[in-house]
Image (cartoon, grey):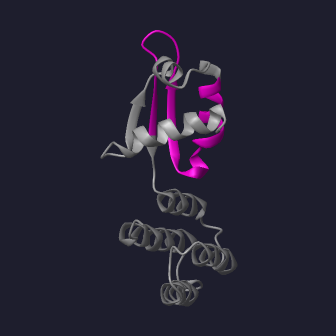
Amino acid sequence: MSNIADLIEHYILQRLAAQQNCNVILKRADIADVIECAPSQISYVLNTRFTSDKGFIVESRRGLGGFIRITRVPLQDLVYGDLINKINNETTVKDLHNMIDYMLKHNLIKNREAALIYQSFNNIYNKISASDRANFLRSLFITLADFTEEE
């Protein structure tokens, strides 16, 4: 038999899967009634299994009229967003190489794309200002994110 946390997670994932927009609004009391558990157990599951690093955004309000809104965000969107936020005027060729390695490791880009990004950045690194380099790199990553196919 599964433990309560597994049952709560399964219930939430089923409800989320039934929605077309990857977004579900639930009430703690309703989940507690269905699963026959305490609301604090639901909070535990939300805090440990529906985290941003697992591709979820959770908004929770307690009390009368309270709700839980869970949105599934494709993991690659989170990764690209994080990488784009790390790019600044001090971003070096080595930093970019580490980012590219990370994207390759997580199958966000192919070797060919990695080579193009690296070579493009390497060629302009000393030819344009730091802010222009950062903007150029951000635009490359935004373009990659826009053209990444969801699995």
Q: Quadrant of the C terminus?
A: bottom left
Residue displayed at 59% across by 27% down:
42
Q: In this rendered view, identify the residue nearer to me: 97 or 92.
A: 97
At x 58% / y 65%, what residue is drawn? 87
Q: Nearer the viewer, residue 101 or 140?
A: 101
Vertical position of residue 150 compared to residue 32: above or below: below
Query: Where does the image place residue 63, in percent across and percent down from the top left?
Result: 51, 11
Q: Is residue 147 left or right of residue 105?
A: left
Estimate the x, y position of residue 146 in percent, counting from the top left.
37, 67
Q: Which residues are magenta?
A: 41-70
> In the rendered structure, does residue 82 fall within the stretch colored magenta?
no
Indicate the quadrant containing the N terminus: top left, top right, bottom left or bottom right: top right
Q: Is residue 38 above or below residue 127?
A: above
In terms of image quadrants, where is residue 69?
A: top left
Q: How many marks?
A: 0
| Residue 140 x %, y % | 45, 74
Identify whether 61 is placed above or below 6.
Answer: above
Q: Which residue: 46% across, 56% down? A: 74
- In-front residue for pair 151/111: 151
Left or right: 27 with respect to 94?
left
Residue at the image point whose x is 65% and y is 68% from the top: 90
The relative height of residue 60 versus residue 16 in the rendered view (above or below) is: above
Task: Pick out the residue farthest to the top.
Answer: 64
Whole-percent x and y of residue 3? 67, 35
Q: Is residue 67 magenta?
A: yes
Furthest-front residue in this view: 1
